[in-house]
Structures are given as C-alpha cells and as structure tokens.
C-alpha cells in the first residue's frame, strides 16, 4: 500500500510537469477557523466562525472528489474539531491513493485528546501522517508572539508526546513549524539552542521554516505589520539552509529546494516559480469556499452551490483564467509550504 500510494503520488507529480491535471491531488482544507491562540502574525483567532461545513458535508465532498493523494487539514486549530479523525477517515475511504495527511497544531488542545485522536488517524492506514507543532521562538519569545503564557512548554510537551507515539506508529512524522516574522527575526539560533536543552536529540531538520505572509482570504492579516527586515531574514534563512543536516530521500530534497527559494522570495518578494494553484492543488475554507490557494483571494465557488463536486468548476472559464494568470506570471506572489511542494515537483528540474 505504502509503495503503491507513493508511486501514485510520484507519477501524478511527474505528469504535472507535462500537462495540466484534470483533478487536484493536493487539498489544503481549513477544517475550522476556531483558534485559542492570540498570534501577533495572524488574525484567525479573532474570527467567530459560524456555519462551517458539517461532518456529513465533508463526507459528501470526500465521496465526490476522490483524487487526493495529499490532504492538509489545517485551521485555526484543527484539533478543536472533535470529528477530525472522522474527517481524516472520510478522505482515506474515498481517495484510495491517499499517501500523506498533514496537520498543524498550536499545542493548546489537551494533549491526551490530541494523542487519542491521532492514534485513531494513524490506525486508518495512511502511509504518512505528519504533524507540525508550531514554535516561533524560545520560551519568552514564543509565548509573546503567540500571546499565550506557557505555550512554549506545551509545544515542547506536544513534541515529546509525538516522539513517544512514533515508537508505536512508524507512519507518524512530525516537525516544529517555525514562522519567521519581524517579531522573531534573527532569533532562530538562540531558539534552536534553547529547544535543544529541552529536547537533547533535536536536529536542525526537526524545524520546518515558513515566512510570515499576508493573506486576506485565510489569515485575515492583510493590515498587520509582520514583515521582517529583508537583509536580516535573508541571511537567517540562508544560514538555516547551510546548517541543515544532509538527509537522503525525496522529501529532504524538496525541503531544501523549498528553503532555497524561500531565500529568493524573502530577497525579492517575487514568486520564485509559477505555482500549481488550481492545477495540482486547491484551498477550501471551513465554510466550503473554494480558492486557488490560501494566499489568493479569488473565490471560485462555494461547495454548497456546486453539490460538493469540484469537477463542476475545475474546467470553468474562471478556473482557466486563474491558470492563465499562473502561466503568465501575474498571480499574487506567494511562497508557502502549502503550495511550494507541488510547485517544485511540478517542475522536477527545479529540484536539481
Ligand atoms: S497562526 Fe495558527 S495558532 Fe496562530 S492565530 Fe493563526 S491559526 Fe491560530
């Protein structure tokens, strides 16, 4: 199953080098905008979501759209949805070649509950289940950026719990997610050494790096001043890249290529490569609104209006117009990990 699903993902990614896919293989789905954090970089925590898709609606969507090989269940805090395991199950049941399921967490949900839900997800037989534990700095810095005293200690505890869980579930993978912004620029090395005191076998590759970006259709943070100083952050990302451990495998290769282009993006603010938004992937918010990506505020439809069936809009004039923009380089600049992986594998030469 693992090899077959991995091959399926690889072949689809390869195909996306030569042709426009007629179905997306990566789904970025915000399952809830509920969030107990108070981040300085994001306004999602201020939202009071009402009318989010119900579990039955998600099941209907999963039943009618079966091409996903990679599903990201994001939030808000995704573990605030009690039915996160049932949502994962719906995608696993209908997308037979699902290879990877990814989820972030802010570590603020009771950890026993997170582990309980994760175990149910891990038992579904998805070859790769990956959790990103948000951590934006050493103790005082992380708690200040996240606005929650004690959040750092909870993130460390969450990471330790995942290490324990990994012993029983080899299909579990996890990293810290470090978002660079003006609030923590220049602080990665200090953060790494302090976290290493708490987790002695920590490696640099245990951190996944993002750059804080503005998005009106997702983070709702377009009015926030979060942009780091360019030269500081450019040299910081370059240094992070230089010090990463060498690892064999396709995912470390893609991760390096992603960080390399993050340096270019931080330097120029320009899209380093044309994205595969609305070709390889799409973003759906918790109300069922369909967008090309989390960074592209162009609503294509609402799932409730199209019978939960993406094929009804995938070849529409509006969708073709969006693809035309990605081809002509006029799409909004973005370089987030939600989009970057499928962009990179859609141009395999970029991985060399
Ligand atoms: S960055 Fe994540 S944890 Fe912070 S407010 Fe936004 S959704 Fe919540």
Image (tube, rainbow, N blue to C red):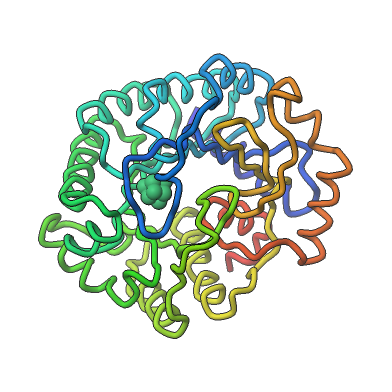
| Number of marks | 0
> Residue drawn 85% across and 51% down?
321
> Residue drawn 53% across and 36% down?
71
Depicted 284 relative to depicted 203: above or below? above
Q: Is residue 144 left or right of residue 23?
A: left
Horizontal and vertical percent position of residue 348: 65, 60
Depicted 327 relative to depicted 305: above or below? below
Depicted 185 relative to depicted 207: above or below? below
Horizontal and vertical percent position of residue 126: 45, 28
Horizontal and vertical percent position of residue 178: 35, 60
Q: Is residue 171 left or right of residue 280?
A: left
Q: Quadrant of the C terminus?
A: bottom right
As drawn, the residue found furthest toward the bottom would be 231
> Residue drawn 50% across and 27% down?
1
Nearer to me, 43 or 127: 43
Horizontal and vertical percent position of residue 19: 80, 49
Q: Is residue 327 left or right of residue 129?
A: right
> Residue drawn 55% across and 48% down?
218
As drawn, the residue found furthest toward the top would be 56
């Amino acid at each position: 199953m693992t090899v077959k699903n991995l091959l399926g993902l690889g072949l689809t990614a390869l195909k996306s080098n030569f042709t426009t896919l007629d179905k997306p293989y990566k789904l970025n789905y915000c399952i809830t905008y509920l969030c107990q954090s108070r981040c300085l970089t994001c306004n999602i925590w201020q939202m009071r979501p009402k009318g989010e898709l119900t579990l039955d609606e998600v099941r209907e969507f999963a039943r009618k759209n079966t091409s996903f090989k990679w599903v990201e269940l994001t939030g808000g805090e995704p573990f605030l949805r009690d039915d996160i395991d049932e949502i994962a199950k719906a995608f696993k049941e209908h997308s037979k070649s699902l290879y990877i399921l990814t989820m972030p967490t802010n570590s603020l949900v009771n950890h026993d509950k997170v582990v309980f839900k994760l175990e149910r997800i891990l038992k579904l037989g998805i070859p790769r289940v990956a959790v990103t534990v948000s951590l934006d700095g050493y103790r005082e810095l992380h708690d200040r950026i996240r606005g929650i005293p004690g959040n750092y200690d909870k993130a460390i505890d969450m990471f330790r719990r995942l290490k324990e869980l990994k012993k029983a579930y080899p299909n579990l993978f996890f990293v810290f997610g470090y978002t660079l912004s003006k609030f923590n620029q220049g602080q990665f090395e200090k953060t790494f050494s302090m976290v290493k005191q708490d987790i002695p076998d920590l490696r640099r590759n245990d951190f996944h790096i993002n750059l804080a970006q503005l998005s009106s259709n997702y983070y709702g943070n377009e009015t926030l001043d979060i942009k780091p100083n360019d030269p500081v952050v450019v040299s910081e990302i370059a240094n992070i890249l230089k010090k990463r451990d060498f690892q064999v495998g396709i995912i470390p290769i893609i991760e390096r290529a992603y960080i390399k282009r993050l340096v270019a993006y931080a330097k120029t603010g320009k899209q380093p490569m044309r994205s595969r938004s609305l070709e390889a992937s799409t973003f759906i918010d918790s109300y069922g609104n369909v967008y090309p990506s989390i960074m592209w505020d162009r609503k294509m439809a609402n799932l409730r209006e199209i019978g939960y069936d993406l094929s009804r809009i995938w070849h529409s004039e509006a969708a073709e117009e969006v693809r035309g923009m990605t081809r002509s380089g006029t799409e909004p600049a973005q370089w987030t990990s939600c989009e970057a992986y499928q962009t990179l594998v859609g141009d395999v030469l970029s991985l060399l």
